[in-house]
Amino acid sequence: MIQETHTKQKGIQLSEAALKRVKILRDEQGSELCLRVGVRQGGCSGMSYMMDFEDVSQISEKDELFDYDGFKIVCDRKSLLYLYGLMLDYSDAMIGGGFQFTNPNASQTCGCGKSFGV
């Protein structure tokens, strides 16, 4: 049974701008997709963020699921240890635009904002 989190304070937060942008990107690829967020070893600071769309059929019992008005974000439990409280934001600014990660668990971050250390 996949556990769906229904709390006011979700483990992975989305700004309105980020939610709007990921919905647009998802709709361009197909509506039965969720957003998988996680971490992997590597990057300038030791760990890097990963984010990609995935078919909802790939969600497993080892995943945490966060629902944003029908849009699902999935994160494996191991990654969630490093990402709990993460705020994902989006800006369409010409310089410095794109997705930004604000991670309260990071003790250091890279200048590019795509990797962190704990």
Image: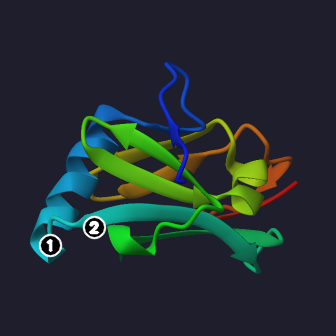
Q: How many C-alpha atoms fall within 10 Å of the one at disc 1: few (<14), some, or many (≥20)?
A: few
Q: Secondary structure at mark 2?
A: strand
Q: Provide the residue designation for mark 2.
A: 33
Q: Quadrant of residue 10?
A: top right
Q: Residue furthest top?
A: 8
Q: How many C-alpha atoms fall within 10 Å of the one at disc 2: few (<14), some, or many (≥20)?
A: many
Q: Secondary structure at mark 1?
A: loop
Q: Nearer the viewer, residue 104 or 60?
A: 60
Residue 94, how many percent across, how many down?
A: 27, 58
Q: Provide the residue designation for mark 1.
A: 30
Quadrant occupied by the C terminus: bottom right
Residue 111 visible in the picture: yes
Q: Residue furthest front?
A: 1
Image: 109 above or below 33: above
The reply, left or right, for residue 25 in relation to residue 55 is left
What distance separates the C-alpha of mark 1 from that of mark 2? 6 Å
Identified at 60% across, 37% down, the residue is: 11
Q: Quadrant of residue 25?
A: bottom left
> Which kind of residue does numbered mark 1 sit on?
Gly
Image: 87 above or below 75: above
Identified at 79% across, 42% down, the residue is: 105
Identified at 20% across, 54% down, the residue is: 23
Residue 20, how many percent across, how many down?
A: 21, 45
Image: 43 above or below 115: below
Q: Nearer the viewer, residue 34 or 86?
A: 34
Image: 87 above or below 77: above
Quadrant occupied by the N terminus: bottom right
The reply, left or right, for residue 18 in relation to residue 36 is left
Count the marks: 2
Q: Do tag 1 and tag 2 residues touch (Cβ < 8 Å)? A: yes
Residue 104, how many percent across, how many down?
A: 73, 37
> Which kind of residue does numbered mark 2 sit on?
Leu
